[in-house]
Image (cartoon, grey):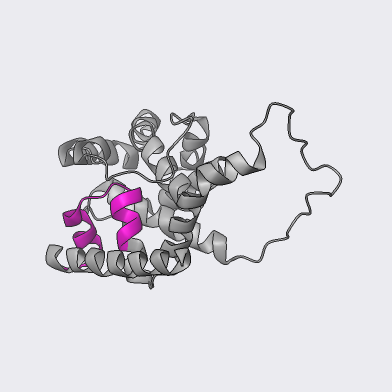
Amino acid sequence: MLPWFPTVAEQCPTCVEKVAPFTAPAAEHEVLAPWNEEGRLLAAIRGGDRTAAEELVERTYSAVYASLYRLCGDGDLASDLTQETYRKAWEALDGFDGRSQFFTWLYRIAYTTFLNHIRRPRRITSLDEAGSPEMPDDAPSADQMISEREEAERLRAAVMTLQEDLRFTVAAHFWGGLPVKEIARIENITGVAVRKRLHKAFSILEAALDEEKR
């Protein structure tokens, strides 16, 4: 793979300043480019065209970042994971065979990158540790911050407890904006099977969240 590929995404600013933790799935045309356009760009990239690589990153960067933000709930971490996603994508680009849309393939890499991150052992920093940032006087109170995010965090935590196939399907459809047919293609299952996964996941999540409120 061409040596400048990993640096392309680093130059792309995050277009999403604030992403809601959870949204309805995005319209298909907002995430997935027509295949003839993807094919043209990918052919140019494989031929060494840096401009084509920059265009492909520009088309997909915000969606990748937004998907990762919804998974992790942290803007800085989402940015780091987005960079890592593109680095891995460039390294694996020769293996992309076009059976799925490029963003579908890219989302799978982003999702796996997130899972690998949360499985790593991490050092926990005390809030009292020297160097910890101080909260400005006009910052929201702890109660306000909790009330604004607690529902989203409970849902995120509940999704993370789902078995892997259900978790990926929910995350890809509702946080990644992938249509059912694209999830079916990348998972090598039918659209009906994808909908069954979603239905099963909803039942489990509803029961878990109801139990938590008791």
The quarter of the displayed image where residue 165 is located: bottom left
Residue at left 68%, top 62%?
122
Q: Nearer the viewer, residue 92 or 18?
A: 18
User: Tag count in the figure?
Assistant: 0
Q: Main secondary structure of the magenta part?
A: helix
Whether the magenta-drawn stretch holds residue 182 is answered as yes
Residue at left 44%, top 41%?
65
Q: Which residue is situated farthest in the right direction here? A: 130
Q: Which residue is situated farthest in the front direction here? A: 214
Residue 93 in sight here: yes
Residue at left 36%, top 33%?
49
Q: Residue 133 vs residue 96: left or right?
A: right
Quick check: 120 above or below 150? below
The quarter of the displayed image where residue 131 is located: top right
Query: What span is colored magenta in the figure?
Result: 169-189
Q: Which residue is situated farthest in the bottom direction here? A: 163
Whether the magenta-drawn stretch holds residue 99 is answered as no
Residue at left 33%, top 42%?
46
Quick check: 162 above or below 123? below
